[in-house]
């Protein structure tokens, strides 16, 4: 049978209210009494009631976390960051998937509100423009991850990340560079595409719409996107992919076409999922600070719950160069003629 505050009070010879105050660090209880009661509570195996704590604090100490797909490898470290920051501050996290469906996403958010979650965090929202009016309706804070135009958001600088990826390929000597986008990527996709365009302009290369091929952020979309690029009269020599899953699909399409990465085409992804270093060849990619995204989102939510003013957080990505990118073959042949790498002939 669970030990109650009343049981501790009887053993300590004090009132239940004194025990409650001692366990909650009330300033009217002396340090000596607090220590004695806490020691006694521990000896008796007392475990505080979450329900009672919620009634006293008028909070449930729960956070709702909405993700797109539980199978998405990008999200594992984001969720870990949210959970660890929540646990450190006495909160529990309820997780639910939207499956990329805007209607389901809003239904999940509404369910969290009905269950009296103290706040909500949403990753990769498909309907970020709807959240501003919800703040007044719900009366609880909502933080979005990777939706930088929303009032309370934590994002990777996708514009800068798109530049990093494209400039890496340009510096290798590629001038015809494709981009496999994600039609479901929303603002994130647009920012990465704009970063791609900015890098091209910086190097004096005109943007070619035919080199942008639609994907869906998943392996199959990357595969189909690469097939369309390969069908062009003059295919690209390198491709920047919306994310690493897209790059995995693109590599599969190249293999089916009898082409090799990076000998025949260089690939660059985005995210640096845990699998990226173990692909064949290991994938060059832009690393998102995934754990920091999740932790920062939870810390922002805690600040909002405390009534503090917050500003949007923009985290920088990092280019991770591996073996899936190299100079285009015609440059390697030129180097070989000058006495360079003979093995590439």
Image (cartoon, helix red, strand yellow):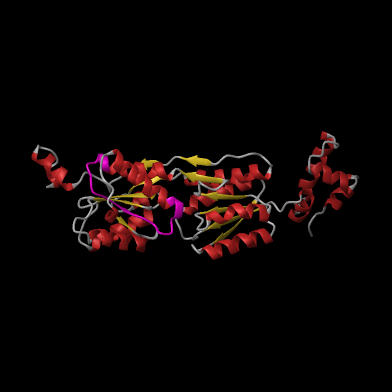
Quadrant hosting residue 332: top left
Q: Nearer the viewer, residue 258 or 246?
A: 246
Determine the residue positioned at 9% across, 37% down.
Answer: 338
Find residue 306 and report its image quarter: top right
Answer with left or right where residue 120 lies relative to residue 192: right
Q: Quadrant of the N terminus?
A: bottom right
Q: Position of residue 326 (x, y in %)?
A: 24, 45
Left or right: residue 237 compared with residue 116: left
Direction from residue 144 to residue 332 in the image, left or right: left
Please check the rendered image and state whether residue 174 is part of the magenta-colored stretch, yes or no. yes
> Is there any visible trace of residue 26 in the rendered image?
yes
Start-end of magenta stretch: 170-188
Residue at (83% x, 46% y) in the render: 20
Residue 273 appears anywhere in the view: no
Q: Residue furthest top?
A: 31
Residue 231: x percent and y percent? 22, 62
């Amino acid at each position: 049978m669970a030990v109650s505050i009343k049981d501790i009070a009887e053993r300590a010879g004090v009132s239940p209210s004194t025990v409650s105050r001692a366990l909650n660090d009330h300033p009217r209880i002396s340090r000596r009494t607090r220590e004695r009661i806490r020691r006694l509570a521990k000896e008796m195996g007392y475990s505080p009631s979450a329900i009672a704590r919620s009634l006293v604090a008028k909070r449930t100490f729960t956070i709702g976390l909405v993700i797109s797909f539980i199978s998405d490898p990008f999200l594992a470290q984001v969720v870990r960051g949210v959970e660890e920051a929540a646990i450190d501050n006495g909160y529990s996290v309820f997780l639910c998937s939207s499956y990329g469906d805007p209607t389901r996403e809003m239904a999940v958010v509404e369910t969290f509100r009905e269950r009296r979650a103290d706040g909500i965090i949403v990753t990769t929202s498909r309907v970020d423009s709807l959240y501003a009016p919800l703040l007044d309706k719900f009366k609880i804070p909502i933080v979005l991850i990777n939706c930088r135009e929303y009032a309370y958001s934590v994002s990777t600088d996708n514009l800068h990340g798109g530049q990093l990826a494209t400039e890496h390929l340009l510096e290798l000597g590629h001038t015809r560079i494709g981009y496999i986008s994600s039609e479901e990527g929303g603002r994130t996709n647009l920012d990465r595409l704009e970063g791609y365009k900015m890098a091209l302009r910086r190097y004096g290369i005109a943007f070619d719409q035919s080199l942008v091929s639609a994907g869906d952020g998943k392996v199959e979309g990357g595969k189909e996107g690469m097939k369309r690029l390969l069908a062009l009269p003059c295919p690209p020599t390198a491709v920047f992919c919306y994310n690493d899953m897209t790059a995995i699909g693109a590599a599969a399409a190249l293999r089916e076409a009898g082409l090799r990465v990076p000998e025949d085409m260089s690939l660059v992804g985005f995210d640096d999922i845990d699998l990226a270093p173990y692909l064949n060849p290991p994938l060059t990619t832009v690393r998102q600070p995934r754990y920091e995204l999740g932790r920062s989102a939870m810390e922002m939510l805690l600040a909002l719950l405390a009534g503090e003013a917050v500003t949007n957080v923009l985290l920088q990505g990092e280019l991770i160069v591996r073996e899936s990118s190299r100079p285009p073959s015609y440059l390697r042949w030129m180097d070989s003629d000058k006495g360079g790498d003979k093995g590439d002939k």
